[in-house]
Image (cartoon, grey):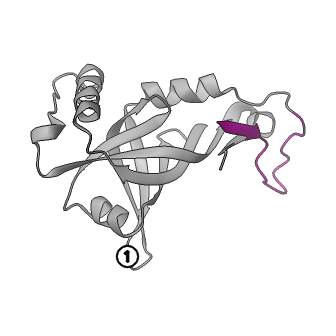
Amino acid sequence: MMQRERPHMTRYGIAAGDTGMIEWAWVDEQLTKARNYWIGTVTPEGKPHVMPVWGVWLDGVFYFGSDRESRKSKNIDAQPEIVVHLESGDDAVIVEGRAERVTEVAQLDKLSAVYDAKYPGYTPDFKSEPDTVIFAITPKKVFAWKESDFPNTATRWTADE
């Protein structure tokens, strides 16, 4: 369960109270319909690394695939904390969480079907692609706002521990 509240952004004029806060349904819609997502990881040396990826938002979890030898996969192996950001900085959705590898065959099959529907012409078979690893990110924190009314729409969700 995610708890909705105002983000702590001193000096940004963030409104008090619930009026204007974004509903989770809007966040869910944005994450579902996005085509490209930006993934932020950290190298073992502590340097930032950001790359765009294709992915899917399914049942409150973000999934994406990567070559197991890619920089982002190696970064996640060393430090699994990750940030996912949609392309827009105006209507922003930012997810913070921990990446975990998906290995369950039934889940990999389900994800292949969802990818196939979302990205026509790309029909992955994640079970038989030995060089591909699939990561799942369950949100720990989510930030969202609409630039057109930032002070009133800025919203943060925090997962129950």
Q: Is residue 4 magenta?
A: yes
| Numbered marks: total | 1
Q: Position of residue 32 (x, y in %)?
A: 45, 26
- What amino acid type is highlighted by mark number 1? Pro
Q: Position of residue 113 (x, y in %)?
A: 24, 23
Q: Residue furthest bottom?
A: 45
Q: Residue furthest right?
A: 16
Instruction: For the N terminus, give its image quadrant.
Output: top right
Q: Is residue 99 magenta?
A: no
| Residue 24 vertical placement versus 96 (above, below) | above
- Magenta span of residues: 1-17
Compared across the picture, whether 11 is left or right of 26 comes to right
Give me the residue at 35% from left, 47% from top: 52
Q: Position of residue 136 (x, y in %)?
A: 39, 44
For the question of whether residue 90 can be seen, the reply is no
Compared across the picture, whether 94 is left or right of 46 comes to right
Q: Quadrant of residue 150?
A: top right
